[in-house]
Image (cartoon, helix red, strand yellow):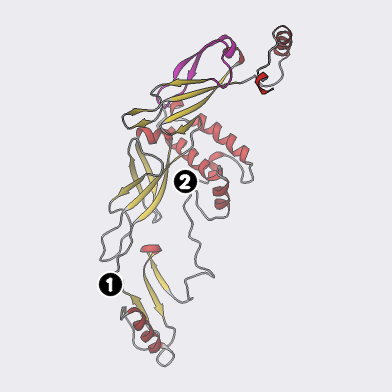
Amino acid sequence: MRDPYEVLGVPRGASAAAIKSAYRKLAKKHHPDNNKNDPKAAARFAEINSANEIIGDEDKRKQFDRGEIDAEGKPRFQGFPGGGFPGGNQRGRAGGPGGFESYTFRTGGGPGVGGAGFEDILNSMFGGATRGARPGGGRTFEFDTGGIGLDLDLSVAMTVSLEESVKGGEKRVRLPTGKELNVRIPAGVTAGQQIRLKGQGETAPGHPPGDLLITVSIAPHPFFKVDGSDLRLDLPVTLYEAVLGGKVRVPTLGSAVELSIPKNTSSGRIFRLKGKGLPKPGGTGDLFITTRIILPDGNDSELEALMEKWRESHPYNPRSDFG
């Protein structure tokens, strides 16, 4: 994935509020429901969510800025303390468990300079499991795993959108080895669930290939909050819609619906749309909508004059119960 700062279009020194604002604008602009004729909208939307998951989280952002994780949230290999491999003159071949298939240890001396003695020590420590000693100068020992089982499974994380978790789909995943795979996302996948791909892990001579374990996380949605199998949505309404009532268009995970707002609706009133939540055993959750009255930006002298007149003729105290 691209640099998350670049994806959200913010500088590295941007405040948390600026990042949140940029994410909301981009998520709204590129949401698949608003770009049904654009086949690339879902990919852009997923990339925006993934970027926000990294730099929208304070701890992950610090890890990314320090170079501890990459743009997908995967740990970066920092190397061994002091550089190279433990002990200075050891060599490994990349590709096996922990990043290496086999390890080669050089004694660095010839006969009479600790070479044979080192071999004896290794043989006594590993029960004769060392092999490949060369006569003459330096001695090389390759550790034979013998009957020790190798963990060749690979584990990666994959972030999906809320819509993808409900409807399923296909997503491309990049492995630590550099290989890329198209992974089918099953409909109804939940956060923390693992997808196992047999035989797609690491390989080692004489051993069956490991599996690929993909742990799923669900990106925060710009509109909906997940509450078990239910969804919650804050719905902005105008002052005149709250006073006079009317029909308001409301997004759902499917197509948008119209919600009838009764006259004299207070901010904070909750409406329930049955069956518009997430799938659950034996049915579907609900969508709970909370109205939020939003006043227009800036000062409005006419509105202020109207409210002053109305206050004089219709005084009331909604906080009377507070004492």
On the image, the x and y values in percent for residue 202 come to 33, 58
Q: Quadrant of the C terminus?
A: top right
Kindly check if marks 1 and 2 are in contact, taking CB atoms under 8 A apart as contact: no
The part of the chain drawn in magenta is 242-269
| Residue found at x 48% / y 18% | 249
Q: Nearer the viewer, mark 1 or mark 2?
A: 1
Please say whether residue 95 is visible from this viewpoint.
no
Question: Horizontally, is 263 left or right of 125 in the view?
Answer: right
On the image, the x and y values in percent for residue 317 come to 68, 16
**The magenta stretch spans residue 293:** no
Q: Which residue is situated farthest in the bottom direction here?
A: 112
Mark 2 is surrounded, within 10 Å at the Cα level, by few (under 14), some (14 to 19) or many (20 or more) other residues, namely few
* 302, above or below 44, in the image: above
Q: Amino acid at mark 1?
A: Gly
On the image, the x and y values in percent for residue 315 come to 70, 11
Circle 2 SS class: loop
Q: Which residue is situated farthest in the top direction here?
A: 313
Residue marked by disc 2:
1
On the image, the x and y values in percent for residue 72 come to 47, 48
Mark 1 is surrounded, within 10 Å at the Cα level, by few (under 14), some (14 to 19) or many (20 or more) other residues, namely few
Q: Amino acid at mark 2?
A: Met
**The magenta stretch spans residue 267:** yes
* 226, above or below 60, in the image: above
Residue 146 is labelled as: 1
Mark 1 or mark 2: name the one nearer the start of the chain: 2
